[in-house]
Image (spheres, rainbow, N blue to C red):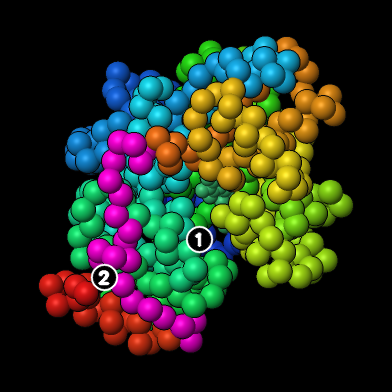
């Protein structure tokens, strides 16, 4: 019960987890968690129903975190409005956001809250160090919400232009620290890893991004919840991707579930990006397993034009063993490049027929589904799971007060070249939180 180990997808080495994110032999491959095969659905609330397939060992940890975030879970339901509109009888929606009428209570309004909760559980059991995380905004918001509620320290590195996306509905302790970085998301990722490499004194640990099994397995809950509701695997899975962490996590969990319940097969993965910046779409269209310069021409200008710029990762885990290319290949999947105008139209349609506001990124997935139906890739009797990765912001505002992190907690402004200075400041903040308050 609760036991798991890690396996390198390249060399097969088995590893005991100590918040390990890389193969000790240096393989350029993901580590995957290996759980006991007999998944039980526990009589529990929220995501803890699936606790046997999450990287948590101890029921004490589960109990502790469950009291902090009791009701976070994806909600899978059979669509009435959009299904009719598109002529698909078995369209299921996995709603990840805030929508109390459907029992959806993610107060940070995206599926990244699942990643945050599972990472909190993994940190709680595996390390005493402080986590450092890079984010374009949505991940930082989820981690801020969950780590604040747990009063657990975390350092969030966010491009300064995106810090308005980082807010919470709970009080933020001073050990939740925001580093506002001049630069873009890719700079933030680089800065976060420099910080942890130089930090021997201050005990920081890199969260790990796609290499963090807690993030992938946390998102994998989406397919387990769908399986429980639909009572079979969907034929198709649709999601908007920036890095592809969610898609990889869902694929891995579907793989485990299909070994456990052998009458099922893994869904075709339909992944969508937002034009004009769509490097994985561009590489996959050419059936290349690497992203080349040609896939990202005028990247900065293109990113500025995106409707859903949370999808703007310049270095996604596409070629890495176990990454997006492998997931698409293994499932006979498809990639979509969605224009802003298509996304806006899809968003309007969804909000009108389903009755809840959605994140611009989620509308990219809706537009991909519309496109797949038009092209006959999805047939009217197929079982489809559409992942609405974020939504309910307006609904949340009717119910909760939110406060912007940069108005309430410790904030450090930084330049990409400032690693050393920021380390000194961080050390002061983490060891002397009272002084650090602005
Ligand atoms: C982050 C995010 C995505 C993309 O997820 P990746 O795991 O980066 O591919 C999609 N939708 C929303 C709302 C997001 O916040
Ligand atoms: Zn290895």
Residue 411 in the magenta stretch? The answer is: yes
Of pointers 2 and 1, the one earlier in the residue sequence: 1
Report the residue at 46% width, 83% height from top: 415
Image quadrant holding the C terminus, namely bottom left
Between 287 and 295, the residue placed more toward the observer is: 295
User: To which quarter of the image does residue 298 belong?
Assistant: bottom right
Residue 89 in the magenta stretch? The answer is: no
In the image, residue 53 lies at what x, y percent?
42, 33
Question: Going by the image, does 69 lie left or right of 143?
Answer: left
Instruction: Note whether ligand 1 is within 8 Å of mark 1.
Output: yes
206 relative to 46, above or below: below
Q: Residue 410 carries which label?
A: 2
Report the residue at 61% width, 60% height from top: 313
Which range of residues does the magenta coloring cover? 396-417
Image quadrant holding the N terminus, namely top left
Q: Which mark is residue 136?
A: 1
Asked if residue 251 shows in the view, the reply is: no
């Amino acid at each position: 019960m609760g036991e798991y180990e890690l396996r390198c997808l390249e060399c097969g080495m088995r590893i005991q987890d100590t918040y390990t994110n890389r193969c000790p032999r240096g393989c350029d491959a993901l580590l995957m968690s290996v759980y006991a095969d007999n998944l039980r659905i526990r009589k529990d609330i929220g995501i803890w129903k699936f606790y046997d397939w999450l990287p948590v060992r101890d029921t004490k940890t589960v109990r502790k975190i469950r009291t902090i975030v009791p009701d976070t879970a994806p909600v899978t339901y059979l669509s009435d409005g959009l299904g009719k509109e598109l002529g698909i009888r078995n369209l299921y929606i996995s709603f990840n956001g805030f929508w109390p009428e459907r029992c959806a209570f993610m107060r940070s309004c995206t599926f990244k809250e699942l990643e945050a909760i599972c990472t909190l559980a993994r940190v709680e059991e595996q390390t005493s160090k402080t986590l450092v995380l890079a984010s374009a905004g949505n991940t930082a918001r989820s981690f801020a919400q969950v780590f604040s509620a747990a009063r657990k320290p975390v350092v969030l590195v966010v491009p300064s232009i995106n810090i308005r996306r980082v807010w919470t509905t709970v009080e933020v302790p001073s050990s939740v620290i925001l580093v506002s970085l001049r630069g873009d998301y890719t700079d933030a990722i680089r800065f976060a890893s420099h910080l942890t490499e130089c930090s021997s004194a201050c005990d920081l640990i890199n969260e790990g991004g796609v290499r963090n099994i807690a993030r992938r397995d946390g998102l994998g809950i989406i397919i387990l919840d769908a399986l429980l509701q639909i009572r079979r695997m969907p034929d198709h899975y649709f999601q908007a991707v920036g890095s592809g962490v969610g898609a990889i996590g869902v694929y891995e969990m579907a793989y485990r579930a299909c070994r456990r319940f052998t009458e099922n097969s893994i869904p075709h993965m339909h992944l969508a990006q937002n034009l004009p910046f769509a490097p994985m779409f561009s590489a996959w269209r050419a059936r290349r397993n690497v992203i080349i310069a040609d896939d990202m021409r005028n990247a900065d200008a293109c990113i500025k034009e995106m409707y859903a710029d949370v999808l703007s990762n310049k270095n996604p885990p596409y070629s890495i063993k176990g990454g997006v290319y492998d997931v698409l290949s293994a499932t006979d999947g498809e990639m979509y490049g969605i224009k802003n105008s298509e996304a806006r139209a899809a968003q309007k349609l969804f909000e009108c027929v389903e009755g809840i506001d959605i994140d611009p990124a989620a509308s990219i997935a809706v537009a991909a589904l519309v496109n797949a139906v038009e092209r006959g890739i999805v047939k009217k009797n197929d079982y489809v799971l559409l992942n609405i990765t974020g939504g309910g912001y307006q609904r949340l505002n009717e119910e909760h007060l939110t406060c912007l992190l940069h108005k309430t907690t410790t904030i450090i402004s930084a330049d990409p070249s400032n690693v050393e200075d920021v380390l000194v400041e961080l050390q002061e903040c983490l060891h002397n939180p009272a002084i650090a308050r602005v």
